Image (cartoon, rainbow, N blue to C red):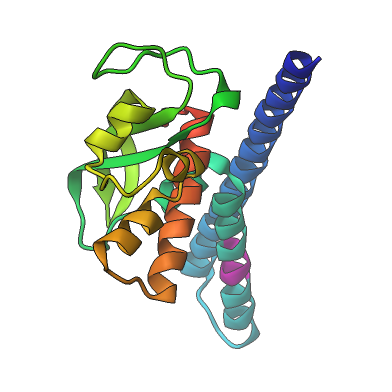
Amino acid sequence: MSDSNSAVVALADTVSELLYGIVGWLLIGLGLFAAVTVSLNAIGDGLAGMEALLTALMLAVSFVFVALGIFVNPRLRRRLSRRHSLSTFGRVQSVDQRVIRPEEDCTERCVACQSPIEKGMVRRYRTEFALAGVPVYTDSVGHNHYCLACAAAELQLPDAIEAEEIESGNWREAFSEVDGSTTTDSDSQTDLATKTTADADLEAETTDT
């Protein structure tokens, strides 16, 4: 029954993402079409008085449609969530990771010891092309899976951190406590947001191109 429910949930998530993607692209297309049409009319007829105000209003509405389309589309939203600094152009390499939990029924083997993985960590290596920090093309994606013991060794965690910390995904906080370092509230919120986004992105297992 649980496997059946999981399959239904996975199918519902896939359909939902597909529909959101379609709506997102439609909004972007509508916004761009309106912006181009208004701009061409303005260039051909000129602007004066009320016409200039209406043109500015239509361009603002077009921008809103494009922005909504970007944020509604799951693939574009994921790209924005992993954006780099505005000065980043060209090929960029990035690494993210998340915890593997027992309920996921992972079928991969640990890259370090080749043992089956019940719980541990998956690390993703990504090479992509960015414009103004926003990834526009994914060149390659690779995954390394680690069992719990090898994950702790790979992360070079102190012995004082127990396995439960890794399983719960709180190894970053535990490492800071053992190491004696402190994090500000803003840093913690940023780490949490980054981890949540990475988890969702890895669980979706999408390779956007």
Q: Nearer the viewer, residue 178 or 106?
A: 178
Q: What is the magenta segment's predominant secondary structure?
A: helix
Q: Residue at point 25% right, 42% down?
A: 94
Give the magenta part as a residue range.
Answer: 58-62
Q: In the displayed structure, would residue 111 be above or below residue 120?
A: above
Q: In the displayed structure, would residue 122 be above or below residue 60?
A: above
Q: Nearer the viewer, residue 28 or 34?
A: 28
Q: Residue at point 42% right, 73% down?
A: 186
Q: Can residue 209 be seen in the rendering of this structure?
A: no
Q: Residue at point 48% right, 48% down?
A: 197
Q: Quadrant of residue 146?
A: top left
Q: Nearer the viewer, residue 83 or 3?
A: 3
Q: Position of residue 145 (x, y in %)?
A: 34, 23
Q: Can residue 170 be seen in the rendering of this structure?
A: yes
Q: Is residue 5 left or right of residue 109?
A: right
Q: Nearer the viewer, residue 25 or 12?
A: 12
Q: Position of residue 1 (x, y in %)?
A: 81, 14
Q: Position of residue 187 (x, y in %)?
A: 38, 69
Q: Quadrant of residue 52?
A: bottom right
Q: Residue furthest bottom?
A: 49
Q: Residue furthest left?
A: 90
Q: Is residue 152 left or right of residue 101?
A: left
Q: In the displayed structure, would residue 67 be above or below residue 102?
A: below
Q: Residue at point 56% right, 68% down?
A: 59
Find out whether residue 31 is within the magenta segment: no
Find out whether residue 61 is within the magenta segment: yes
Q: Residue furthest right?
A: 1
Q: Position of residue 183 (x, y in %)?
A: 35, 71
